[in-house]
Image (cartoon, grey):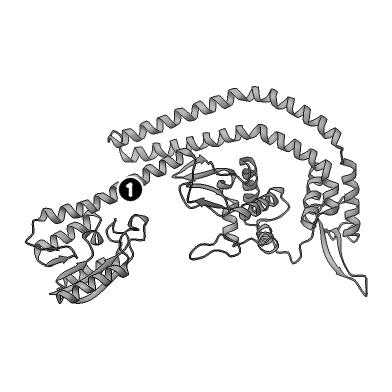
């Protein structure tokens, strides 16, 4: 009798305890040698058997049996052959019609003359295992979602704690990505420039894994980071937005501000050979056009200098220019005019605390109403699911209602997040403005090019 030796191991976690393919082959070959089986072909694959039509190795085995090129199957167990009713029925019918004369395992053979219930029960158990596993996974996923935990692999900058089963900050990667977000929020750098700084100046490398990692952050991966609400403390799953328990790098309002800026920049591609500190920040006082910069190489010991001038060739002042060090001296003088002392900062902070207490009372009613609306929507969604499970709602109508409710629930969750952030955002804006006026001149004088550009941009925006 001619046999097809079939060994399979799923790549999914539910099969981690099953013998490896090498172990299966070793034992099955030993059985074939001891019993004198004629093995016409060995087929191995690492595919899940929970769905039909997704295993080319299994299809090849069936083809050999149907063409009469093999008579039986030698495998580790019946559940290596099938975990779905379609493939199980296919094998059962081939046994009954004689196209398949035997399924041989290390424990026992399955023959056409056997009671069909035996094979049906064992394949049914294999199929039920998959169904029970899917239910358990769904329950586990739903539990994690309700608790505010992302039920998948943590994105870049975070890591999955295998002991506590939560998502936590990934050390220096978290800190560096948060610094990158701050550059983007400040509006002084394009996303491409931020990614360049992250890789080349700060030495960022992606999280290592078995197959890849420990590399520079690619531009596409960087853009995925800068458009993911996960970094604002939320995450998306199944069409809904959830408030996460993981540490946020930025606030929701900062994330939305970045998205508006990114949407405005799409389709605009600019190439700059040099990165000048103050281009894009200054405009000509005569014609209003942007001020550009160019690098001029000096002679002898004069060195190289950056000069700024109006980009409009028709402007009366278009030929006039100012050297970068002279421009920075004037910027320092501007910062000196707005610098405050510690005493003034303390007075403003005390007034800010009084305002926050008064404002919170006015916002409390709106916040409570949003929480009540969210609770009602979630109850309605649960009731809709129950009606679908009892077949009281047709699938087409259920899908429409489900999408509507998911959108409404997501919008409410984001609205609640915005309400929670509103007061904190106001506090942060005022405290940031005070800190800027207190320390800006010092940081400008001691900072690098990127820091000076950031401070200059804030000064021009507030003027």
Q: Quadrant of residue 380?
A: top left
The N terminus lies in quadrant: bottom left
**Residue 98 relative to residue 457: left or right:** left
At numbered mark 1, what does the secondary structure look like: helix, strand or loop? Answer: helix
The percent position of residue 195, horizontal first and vertical second, equals 65, 59
Q: Can residue 69 be seen in this view?
A: no
Residue at image mark 1: 134
Quadrant where the C terminus sits is top right
Residue 448 in which image quadrant: bottom right
The residue at the point 90 percent across, 44 percent down is 336
- Mark 1 neighbour density, 10 Å: few (under 14) some (14–19) many (20 or more): few
User: Whole-percent x and y of residue 340?
Assistant: 87, 38
Q: Is residue 17 left or right of residue 273?
A: left
Give the left or right position of residue 49, taking residue 409 as reference.
Answer: left
Most foreground residue, 368 or 204? 204
Is residue 423 something one can see in this rendering? yes
């Amino acid at each position: 009798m001619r046999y097809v030796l079939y060994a399979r191991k799923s790549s999914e976690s539910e099969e981690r305890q099953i013998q490896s393919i090498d172990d299966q082959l070793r034992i099955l070959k030993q059985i074939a040698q001891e019993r004198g089986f004629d093995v016409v072909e060995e087929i191995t694959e690492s595919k899940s058997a929970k769905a039909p039509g997704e295993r080319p190795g299994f299809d090849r085995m069936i083809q050999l049996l149907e063409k009469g090129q093999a008579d039986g199957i030698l495998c580790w167990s019946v559940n290596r052959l099938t975990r779905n009713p379609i493939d199980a029925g296919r094998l059962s019918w081939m046994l009954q019609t004689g196209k398949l004369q035997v399924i041989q395992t290390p424990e026992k053979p399955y023959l056409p003359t056997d009671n069909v219930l035996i094979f049906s029960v064992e394949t049914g158990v294999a199929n039920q295992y998959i169904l029970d596993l899917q239910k358990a996974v769904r329950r586990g996923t739903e539990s994690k979602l309700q608790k505010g935990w992302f039920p998948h692999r943590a994105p870049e900058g975070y890591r999955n704690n295998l002991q506590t089963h939560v998502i936590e900050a990934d050390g220096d990667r978290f800190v560096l990505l948060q610094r990158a977000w701050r550059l983007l929020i400040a509006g002084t750098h394009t996303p491409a420039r931020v990614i360049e700084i992250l890789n080349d100046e700060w030495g960022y490398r992606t999280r290592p894994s078995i197959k890849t990692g420990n590399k520079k952050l690619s531009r596409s991966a960087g853009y995925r980071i800068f458009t993911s609400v996960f970094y604002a403390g939320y995450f998306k799953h199944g069409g809904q937005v959830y408030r996460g328990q993981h540490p946020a790098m930025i606030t929701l309002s900062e994330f939305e501000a970045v998205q508006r800026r990114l949407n405005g920049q799409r389709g605009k591609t600019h190439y700059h050979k040099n990165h000048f500190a103050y281009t894009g920040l200054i405009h000509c006082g005569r014609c209003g056009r942007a001020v550009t910069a160019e690098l001029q190489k000096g002679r002898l010991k004069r060195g190289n200098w950056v000069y700024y001038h109006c980009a409009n060739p028709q402007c009366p002042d278009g030929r006039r220019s100012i050297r970068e060090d002279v421009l920075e001296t004037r910027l320092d003088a501007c910062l000196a005019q707005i610098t405050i002392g510690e005493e003034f900062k303390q007075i403003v902070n005390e007034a800010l605390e009084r305002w926050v207490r008064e404002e919170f009372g006015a916002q409390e009613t709106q916040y409570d109403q949003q929480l009540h609306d969210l609770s009602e929507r979630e109850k309605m969604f649960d009731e809709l699911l129950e009606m679908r499970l009892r077949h009281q709602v047709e699938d087409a109508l259920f899908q429409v209602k489900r999408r509507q409710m998911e959108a409404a629930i997501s919008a409410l969750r984001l609205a609640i997040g915005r309400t929670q952030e509103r007061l904190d955002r106001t506090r942060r804006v005022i405290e940031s403005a005070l800190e800027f006026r207190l320390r800006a001149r010092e940081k400008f004088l001691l900072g690098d090019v990127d820091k000076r550009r950031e401070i200059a941009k804030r000064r021009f925006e507030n003027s």
